Each structure stands twice: as C-alpha cells, then as structure tokens.
Amino acid sequence: MSASIPENGALFSQVTRDQWRAFFATFFGWVLDGFDFTVLTFILIDIQDSFTIEKALAGALGTVTLLFRLAGGMAAGVAADRWGRKLPLMLSIVWFSIFACLSGFATSYAMLFAFRALFGIGMGGEWAAGMPLALEHWPTRLRGVASGMLQSGWYWGYILSAGVYHYIYPLFSNVPDTGWRIMFWVGIIPAFFALWIRVGVKESPVWLARKQHLEVTKEKPVSVWRIFHRDMLGTTIQASLLIASFMFSYYSIAFWYPTFLLESGRSTLSHIIILNIGGIIGMILWGRLSESHLGRRGVITLAALIGVLVIPLYLWTKQPELLLLGALLMGISGTGIWSMAPAYLTELFPTSVRGIGPGFAYHMGAFLGAWTPVILGALQDRGLSIVDSMTACIVVSGLMVAIIARLGPETRGKEFLAIDDEDHKKVKHVNEVKSAT
C-alpha cells in the first residue's frame, strides 16, 4: 500500500463516467441539502420577530432538524443495505425538498418547528444512502479525495444560500413576514434533481455483488442490530462520538456566524463565501493529505487543532482584512475536518452494514451535536456575548475532535469487499457442518 499522494495529472485518470455520475448524484444532493438547511441561519432574526420568540427557541429550529436526522439516517441506512443505495437517496431528496418548502407556509412557531423536524428526516436519509453509493463506485486510492470533494458539497450549498439571501431576499424584505418565507419556498427545487438520479446513475457495484451473493447462498440481509454486537459496538460508539464532536465544532463555528456578522454591521455575503471557500479548499486539501502517511486520523487531528488556534482572527479582531483571513483559515481548518467523514465512516463498517452503520453513527452524532445551536442561544440569553459563546464552544469541540479521532483505528487504503470476513466465516461454518454430516 503506497503512502504517496497521486500526481495531479493522473489523479482522476481511472475514474469512469459511471463513477463520476454516482459522485455527482451524491454531491449535488448534499449541495441542495446544505442549501435548504443553511437558509435558516440567515433568517433567525426575522423568525424571532414574526413569532416573538427568544434566541434559544430560534436556535431550537436548527436543533430539532439535527435530532430528526437520526430517524432519517437509520431508515435510509437500512433501506440502502437491503434494497440498494439509489432508491432511498432519491426519496430522501424529494422528502427534504417538500418540507423545506412547506416551512415557508408555517403560520406559527409550532408549525415551523414541526416542518423543520420532518425536514431533518430527509436530510439524514440523503447522507446515509448517498455516501455509500458514491464511495463504493470509486477506486480505493482516491476515496480520501472523493470524500473531501463530496462533503464540500455542504459548503457550496451554504454559499448558494448566502447568494440567495443577498440577491433574492432584499426584493421581498420590505413586505412584512414574506422575505424569510421566500427563502424556504425555493427549497422545492431540489426535488426535480431526483429524476436525473433515477435515469442517469447506476446502483453501487459493491452492493449488487453482495446482493448476488445473498441470492446464491439464500442468506438473509444482516440485521440493523448487527452494529451493536460486541465485536462492532466499540466502532459504532467511537464513530458516533467523533461525528458528535464534528457537529459540536461545526455549529459552534457556523450556526450563529451570520447573526454575529449582522449584529456587528458586517457583510454576510463576503464573509460567508470566504468561510465556505475555505471549507472547500480544506476538504480537498485534507482529503489528499489523508492518502499520505498522516492518514484519516492524522488530518482530522491537525485540522481541528489549527481551527482552535485561528479563533482570534475569526472572531476577536476588529480589522476587516484580518477578519476575512480568519474566515478563510477557519474554513480550511475548523470546517475542513469534515473532509474525512464520508471516507472514514464508510471504511470503519463492512459492506453488509455500510448503509446503516455510517448512517446511524453520522446521525447519532448529529443527534448529540444538535444541542449546539440552542446552547449557544441560551448562553446569549443569559448574558454571554455571541463572541464569547462561540469561542468557548469552538475550543471545547476542537479538543474533543482531536482526542476522539485518536481512539479509533486508521483505515486508509481499506478495500471495499462485496463479501465480508463475516460472510466467509458463515460459508466456512456451513461447509464444515455439511462435511461433518
């Protein structure tokens, strides 16, 4: 197994059209998912005014979405392992598009709260089904790079929502109670993307090979409870806690950042774009470096610690140029840790549970990290400044990421097999029984 990083000229030479299509199905799904979620961060103040609520309740709209991602991730993960990766991916995109749009029609805080909860189910399903679909198509030596590029789709979605807020929102901001609704209504657009996935993307070859194996051996699909068996429980717990720390870190950095900018009289568009361009650069950078001797765990640890160190430039400085530099560096480091989430999680779990395993871990992590927006809002309600609240949470979460990442195994270079070691053991056991009788 080579520890070198592929040369630029030959980096994608072995990627086929079908592999690119699987990649873009997941990538654009994640872009649109990111757009539909992050529009909320720009209109928290409007929602507070419309429904006369405190900041903690406004933050709870983000929290409830993240909590319900667990249900969607588990449902889509089970479906992806049993019936293929494509179908739950398409259904998840249609689902979150519908409830993103319906959020704009809410007539009360309770109704909006319910719609954002239901939106979270589709949001969770998209990741659980899409990431195995894309990464099971791609060559092993490019999986780290693909992982970073895939996860960067979230930041492209954030940039897209910033653009809509900057250019579309002002056209309706003078109409009472309308501007923030427009931001949600455009969320129906991603539903049409599912049609392209249906006709243009092939099912995962690894899943198809496993399906054929199960048909020949007459075995039943692995139970969802497999990830809680003794031999896999430690992996499930470590993966879930790692993603929880990722979530804690990301929402400490990003959820209240537009509000911080608005309250300090700064442009949201420029800073949000710089933050997310930094995130995209970080995704690709750390993804490539993860194929070196640093491995998956090394780049996670390094990126998280750098993110802690750039806090003064990100939040404390009064110099406009330094603040923009801080946004870029925080994007590269603090949000760049996410480059490893798809690759590391899918490599931790065997093919038989590569839908439900990463799906559960990712969204249990989201469930645990979901309290970050409301915690930050509550800290502000109790008198702590937005800068101090964000600083404290970024420091704690960054250290958590660095520590928990070191608790798990290194997975760089792991092959995806249609028939896992457990399957070989079952076949061997059956043959031994037949021989004995």
Image: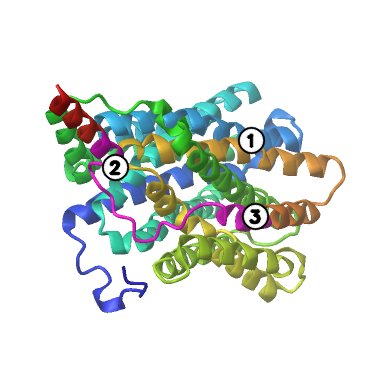
Q: Secondary structure at mark 2?
A: helix
Classify mark 3: helix, strand or loop: helix
**In this image, 92 relative to 304: left or right?**
left
Q: Residues within 10 Å of mark 3 (few under 14, many from 20)?
A: many
- Magenta span of residues: 398-425
Give me the C-alpha separation between circle 1 and circle 2: 61 Å
Mark 2 surroundings within 10 Å by alpha-carbon count, few (fewer than 14), some (14 through 19), many (20 or more): few
Q: Is residue 360 magenta?
A: no
> Can you tell which of label 3 and label 2 is closer to the viewer?
2
Residue at which label 2 appears: 421
Front in this rendered view, residue 91 or 234: 234
Residue 318 visible somewhere in the drawing: yes
Q: Looking at numbered disc 1 in the image, what kind of residue is underneath it? A: Pro
Q: Quadrant of the N terminus?
A: bottom left
Secondary structure state at the residue bearing disc 1? loop
Q: Which mark is residue 423?
A: none
Quadrant of res 287: bottom left
Tell me which numbered mark, 3 or 2, is placed earlier along the sequence. Answer: 3
Q: Say which amino acid is labelled 3.
A: Ile
In the rendered view, would you say 204 is above or below 158? above
Whether residue 201 is visible to the viewer of this picture, yes or no, is: no
Q: Mark 1 to mark 3: distance in Å?
A: 30 Å
Between disc 1 and disc 2, whose residue precedes?
Answer: 1
Farthest residue, direction front: 436
Give the residue number, with chain letter if any, for mark 3.
253
**Above or below: residue 306 compared with residue 161:** below
Label 1: few (<14), some or many (≥20) within 10 Å?
A: few
Residue 76 position, x and y percent, is 37, 31
Say which of marks 1 and 2 sits in front. Answer: 2
Give the image location of residue 132, x and y in percent: 33, 45
Mark on residue 176? 1
